[in-house]
């Protein structure tokens, strides 16, 4: 099945808000084995919205529209869909009662225009929205499935997870495998993959370049789940035999969650001292629930004095080698390892922004150390300040994961 996502709202077209709904839905659909071929954004204009729906129905099996389900005059999604499929809008008595009760329980006044949210195309069904007043709508039309969902992500995401996914799934089984690699370019990776006998019937293999790493997605779709699992495992093993040295992960989790899970399994405690990344590594790690089980502390030592005071870095090293150097990166890591008593420490020091000598822009030293082993990486990251920080953060997380996998099997 092929899907299309239509996001409705002038605020998206103007760039006032980021279209996170399309990203979220595409990832979810991919995990279900449904390919999303088109993202369409349209402003709150009835004719343009109607045109977008007609085009989507002509080329896609599943059409998901987000936004435009509110009570105001510019919320026109249901009206446009009803007109395109030639079905009248009807008011649902049960939904009217639900809305009146919702407002009563919330101690809020319900205005007359809120009853607009009880309207739906005839022969369609409402999708519950326990987190808001705008219910979704599910319509089947000429073999196509049309889903209308509210725009706010905190309403859309649980609605999809709890209801919509069951409305659009079919009898086929889906197997999704993920392989994450770094240290190899996308063109070289593609050449290596093409040299392997891995392109099987019922399977799609794609690569996605992220900042500092590449993800290989293996998606199988068919009736026999045992056959899908067997074939997907065979594909993974063949890829591993060719590029195993570049692989650092095999799941759909983020880099930070993958590292934290690895540390938990190995019962290791982690601390981080950051200079040029300014707390980015710590922020990423602490965004994951349960990080406190393994993450001990994060220190931002931005100035020379802070490195000396907090990490016991010898001022002589800074004077002789410079604050952005292999020697200082090592000293920072060693200082925090001794101070904290943890099992593993990551440090960063570098130039995230342009400096007088332009050749040094993007120069970053990253050190990973435990009580017996250490490794210092000298990297030159491309991009502006934001890109350098993100690339350095991702690299530090990836190499820390490799370090622990190597020394703590």
Image: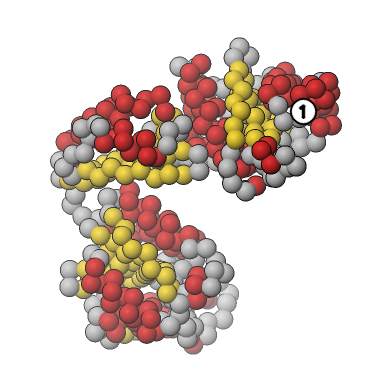
Q: Residue 372 in the image: state x and y as whole percent.
A: 61, 12
Q: Quadrant of the C terminus?
A: top left
* Vertical relation: 268 (above or below) 77: above
Q: Residue 110 in the image: state x and y as whole percent.
A: 52, 82
Which residue is located at x 68 percent, y 23 percent? 326
- Observer able to see residue 311: no
Q: Nearer the viewer, residue 194 or 294?
A: 194
Q: Which residue is mark 1?
A: 322
- Horizontally, is 188 left or right of 271 in the view? left
Q: Residue 80 in the image: state x and y as whole percent.
A: 34, 82
Which residue is located at x 63 percent, y 25 percent? 367
Which picture quadrant has residue 267? top right
Q: Residue 217 in the image: state x and y as whole percent.
A: 33, 42
- Horizontally, is 149 left or right of 362 in the view? left
Q: Nearer the viewer, residue 156 or 177?
A: 177
* Vertical relation: 268 (above or below) 96: above
Q: Quadrant of the N terminus?
A: bottom left
- Horizontally, is 301 left or right of 91 in the view? right
Which residue is located at x 56 percent, y 40 percent? 391
Which residue is located at x 22 percent, y 43 percent? 203
- What kind of element bears circle 1? loop
Q: Nearer the viewer, residue 349 or 157?
A: 349
């Amino acid at each position: 099945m092929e899907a299309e996502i239509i996001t409705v709202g002038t605020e998206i077209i103007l760039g006032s808000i980021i279209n996170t709904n399309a990203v979220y839905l595409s990832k979810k659909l991919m995990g279900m084995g449904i390919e999303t071929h088109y993202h369409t954004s349209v402003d709150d204009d009835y004719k343009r919205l109607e045109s977008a729906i007609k085009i989507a129905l002509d080329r896609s099996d599943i059409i998901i529209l987000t936004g435009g389900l509110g009570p105001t005059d510019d919320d026109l999604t249901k009206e446009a869909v009803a007109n395109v499929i030639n079905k009248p809008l009807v008011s649902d008595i049960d939904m009217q009662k639900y809305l009146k009760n919702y407002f009563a329980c919330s101690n809020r006044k319900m205005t007359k225009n809120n009853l607009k949210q009880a309207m739906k195309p005839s022969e369609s069904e409402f999708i519950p929205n326990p987190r808001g007043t705008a219910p979704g709508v599910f319509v089947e039309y000429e073999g196509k499935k049309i889903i209308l969902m509210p725009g706010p992500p905190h309403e859309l995401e649980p609605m999809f997870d709890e209801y919509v996914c069951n409305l659009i799934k079919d009898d086929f089984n889906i197997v999704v495998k993920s392989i994450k690699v770094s240290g190899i370019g996308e063109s070289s990776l593609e050449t290596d993959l093409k040299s392997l006998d891995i392109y099987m019937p019922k399977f799609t293999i794609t690569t996605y370049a992220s900042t500092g790493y590449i993800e290989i997605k293996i998606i199988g779709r068919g009736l026999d789940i045992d056959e899908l699992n067997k074939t997907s495992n065979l594909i993974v093993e063949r890829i591993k035999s060719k590029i195993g040295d570049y692989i650092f992960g095999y799941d759909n989790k983020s880099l930070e969650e993958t590292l934290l899970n690895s540390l938990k399994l190995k019962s290791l405690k982690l601390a981080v001292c950051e200079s040029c990344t300014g707390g980015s590594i710590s922020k990423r790690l602490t965004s994951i629930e349960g990080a406190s089980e393994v993450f001990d502390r994060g220190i931002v030592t931005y100035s020379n004095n802070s490195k000396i005071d907090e990490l016991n870095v010898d001022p002589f090293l800074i004077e002789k080698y410079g604050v952005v150097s292999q020697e200082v990166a090592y000293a920072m890591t060693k200082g925090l390892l001794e101070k904290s008593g943890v099992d593993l420490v990551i440090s960063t020091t570098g130039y995230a922004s342009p400096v007088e000598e332009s050749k040094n822009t993007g120069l970053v030293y990253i050190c990973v150390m435990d009580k017996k082993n250490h490794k210092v990486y000298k990297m030159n990251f491309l991009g502006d300040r934001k890109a350098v920080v993100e690339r350095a953060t991702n690299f530090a997380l990836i190499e820390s994961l490799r370090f622990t996998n190597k020394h703590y099997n």
